[in-house]
Image (tube, rainbow, N blue to C red):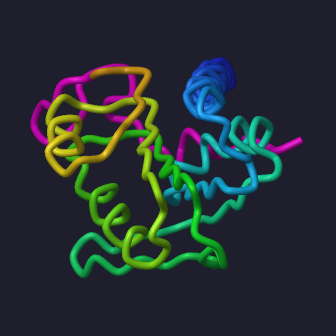
Amino acid sequence: MDGSQRQHWMVQSRRLAEEVADDLSGRRIDEREIAIGFVARGGMLLFPAFSTLFPRSFWLVATCERQGGLLHTMQWPTFKPAVFVLVDAVAATGGTLLTMARLVRENCQPSELLIATLSCTEFARDRFVHEGYRYRALIEDTLVDGAPSGDLAGLDAGDLFQGIGVS
């Protein structure tokens, strides 16, 4: 992954964060009532954009063991969020995000949960809708052999994140 590709995805990250901000601003939700969970490693790619647009929101980094469904966070919010935004770079099958969404609901009871990704396959989208979750994705992708087929195909989100600094 070279610098120009990384820069491209940083611009896309900003677009996604702006879409989420626009979505939430129309409902007059105080930024301090928003919790944002970044899925490690891929979601960290989006941290610079979201932290700039939501500087007073509660942030956490979460990892999920796919087999056991265990969620590890740095810290759960001590308040009931009006909105909890789960952020990841790619939703291929949606399994990790759905597991995290269920655990967020159990531990935080947010009034609303929104899933935000750069790329989302139609398979993941259908699962999110079936489970009753709202989602935002910049790229609607197809699932081919268990992976997205578009621009992010074959790229590891952690590799995308490597070398990006927060200023």
Q: Residue at x 21, y 76 (%)?
A: 67
Image quadrant holding the N terminus, namely top right
Quadrant of the rendered image containing residue 25? top right
Vertical side of 63 occupied by 10: above or below? above
Does the magenta run of residues contain 13?
no
Let me know if residue 60 appears in the view.
yes
Quadrant of the rendered image containing residue 68? bottom left
Residue sticking out furthest to the right:
167
In this rendered view, identify the residue nearer to me: 100 or 106: 106
Q: Residue at x 34, y 55 (%)?
A: 97
Lateral position of residue 82 relative to residue 70, left or right: right
Counting from the top left corner in percent of width and height, residue 139 is at: 37, 20
Vertical side of 123 occupied by 62: above or below? below
Counting from the top left corner in percent of width and height, residue 154 is at: 33, 35
Q: Residue at x 49, y 79 (%)?
A: 72
Q: Residue at x 26, y 23 (%)?
A: 141
Counting from the top left corner in percent of width and height, residue 42 is at: 50, 49
Q: Which residues are magenta?
A: 141-167
